Image: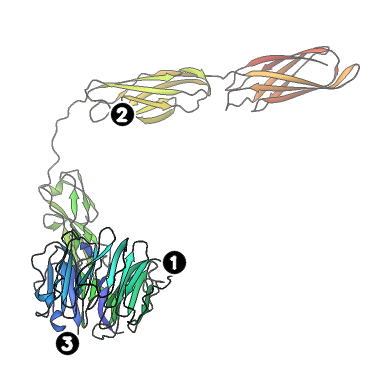
Amino acid sequence: MRILLAAAAVSVLVLGAVGGPAHAATPLPTDLAGTVITWGDESNTESSAAIPVPGDLTGLVRSVAASAVATGAVTVDGQVKVWGDPDAPEVSEAPAGITDATTIVLSTGNGAVLHADGRITAWGSSPQISAIPSDLRAKAIALTGGTGYAVRPDGTLTTWGATPAYSTPAELTDLVDVSVSVDRALALHANGTVTIWGFDDYAGPLSVPDFGGKKVIKVASGTGYSAVVLDDGSLKTWGNMPPGEPPLDGQSAATKVVAISTSATERTAGAVSADGNMYVWGGNNAMTGVFLSGGKSVAAVALGENHAAAIVTAFRALTQPTVTGTPEVGQTLTATPATLSLTPDAPATGQWYAGNDPIAGKTATTLIVDDTLVGKTISYRTTATRGADTVASSSTQTGAVAPVPTVDPVPLPTSTVSVSVSPARAAVGTARAVTATVTTAGTLAPTGTVTFTVGTTTATTPLTAGRATWQLPSLKVGAYRVSATYSGDANTAASTSTVSTLTVTKATSKVTGKAKVTGKTRKVAKKVTLTLTVKSTKGLSAAGTVSVKLTGASKMTVTTSVNAAGKATVTYKNLKRGKYTVKLTYTGNQSMARSTGSLKFKA
């Protein structure tokens, strides 16, 4: 294949079927609209008049179509332009004054446009083609001969104009698109399946191949052949396909298909890959070739019999930059850069301006206004380059920068902070909260924060409805000074509370014991084991000592250590037989208070 045109990566490429079929694809989003280019056999008497683009087609174009002798376009403002052989009905009878068209399709002798509200306008050599039911609305249209096909908004299919050359299946539902040619039609369902119908005596089977569970996302019908794009981006064709089909298997951006097109009479087809290249192959050398990436970006193409047309997206600013903020010394202005129709070669740059002069070094999206800008208007400009095209878009200028206004200070209403602790006196491990209440002499409720100080620990808490509360962390035994400082706000002065006291006492404890006697003889118990337990507040260590005083047939006093869990054991050997009383005294620790207990046992 020869290289036809250098074209940048294609974001969206909408391809229209021409000649016999006229496949109506979704119109381009306005951000991909652009100018029309054409190419083909300029020596051909039928197509030569359709190649030169009229000089009055100055608006951005969002839809393009071609027949054997004509080219049609729809601009972003909904106007319709058709040019070519002046004696061709699709040219001479094209309607004027339309301002809400979105899509155009052409076939030999006929044309149609789809309006934004779903209405259809059609014209041409077929007497019935313009007789469209007044209540017909569509989301996709196609033409072949003098017959129009329309997919209604509810997904059903209908026709208008001449009686279809081949019968249409009844009760087709859930459709999203349709493509027709002189011998076949393909209808695409929302679930990714395809229905095909037409003449059996043309080359190319009417059955749909097995796609291995993959869904179809695009369809195109030619004379004697069919083509679809699957959801993995691969191109699948069957029938008497045009020669030279490229291997588009969807395995890479270079082979993943995003659009397809067919031309009926010249057995020519086209496809666009995800990397922006466009392939046109088949029997007409005036149209075939490869469109390669390079400074421009093709967005739509239509194939005629001996010529083709395409939309080249204009590299432009879709929205101009905006600036928010107050143009006053000390304030910060924030810019939102322009949005662009295409990705530039390098990231777009920004520049702040004072009047017509750039502000040196100010290229970020924020600008702190200083004294040097007083009296000047401020704007922000986005600049970007793609290939040979450069876009520079500026925001609306702000008003003149004002100096910092002089405002005499007004004393703020005073505030008072009171602080309370609950409970103010309690044992270690007890949950506590300190609460500050802020009142004001003003009329507005105070806002801001309160900073609490308990001993050497501080915490800052938001003020809500005049109150702030801090759930205190665990505190050691002792007395603590408690105060609260209110930060103040724009309407209330700051203040600090008087000092309160918080007392943390030791937690209570309880010491108990159990005796176990083993190995009794007539005179002694060989072994007596006392198991001691000190119960404490959950989370506190009971580590300390217990004094064990034994009285009875034998008397003795020992001291043993209690572990953090409050457990200890004392063992007596060869203890005289008799009754015993044991007095237990737990000495306590930093967090636990002293306690006593007793137990009795018989040896």
Name the amino acid, label 1: Gly
Task: Tell me which numbered mark, 1 or 3, is placed earlier along the sequence.
Answer: 3
Of 554 and 404, nearer the camera is 554
Name the amino acid, label 3: Asn
Cβ atoms at labels 2 and 3 below 8 Å apart:
no
Where's residue 375, x and y in %? 9, 47
Question: Mark 1 and mark 3: span between their CA atoms?
Answer: 45 Å
Count the labels in the image.
3
In this figure, which residue is indicated by the disc labeled 1?
213
Task: Tell me which numbered mark, 2 or 3, is placed earlier along the sequence.
Answer: 3
Q: Nearer the viewer, mark 1 or mark 2?
A: 1
Where's residue 511, x and y in %? 66, 18
Question: Mark 1 and mark 2: span between their CA atoms?
Answer: 67 Å
In this figure, which residue is indicated by the disc labeled 3?
44
Of 467 and 1, nearer the camera is 1
Of 428 and 376, nearer the camera is 428
Asked which colour scheme the image uses, the reply is rainbow
309 up-or-down from 45: above or below: above
**Residue located 43% across and 71% down the image:** 210
Q: Nearer the viewer, mark 2 or mark 3?
A: 3
Q: Quadrant of the C terminus?
A: top right
Name the amino acid, label 2: Ser
Residue found at the very far bottom of the displayed protein: 43
Q: Quadrant of the N terminus?
A: bottom left
Where's residue 155, x and y in %? 29, 60
Q: Secondary structure beneath disc 2?
A: loop
Mark 1, other Cα within 10 Å: few <14 / some 14–19 / many ≥20: few
User: Quadrant of residue 191 in the image?
Assistant: bottom left
Q: In this view, does 276 lie to the left or right of 372?
A: right
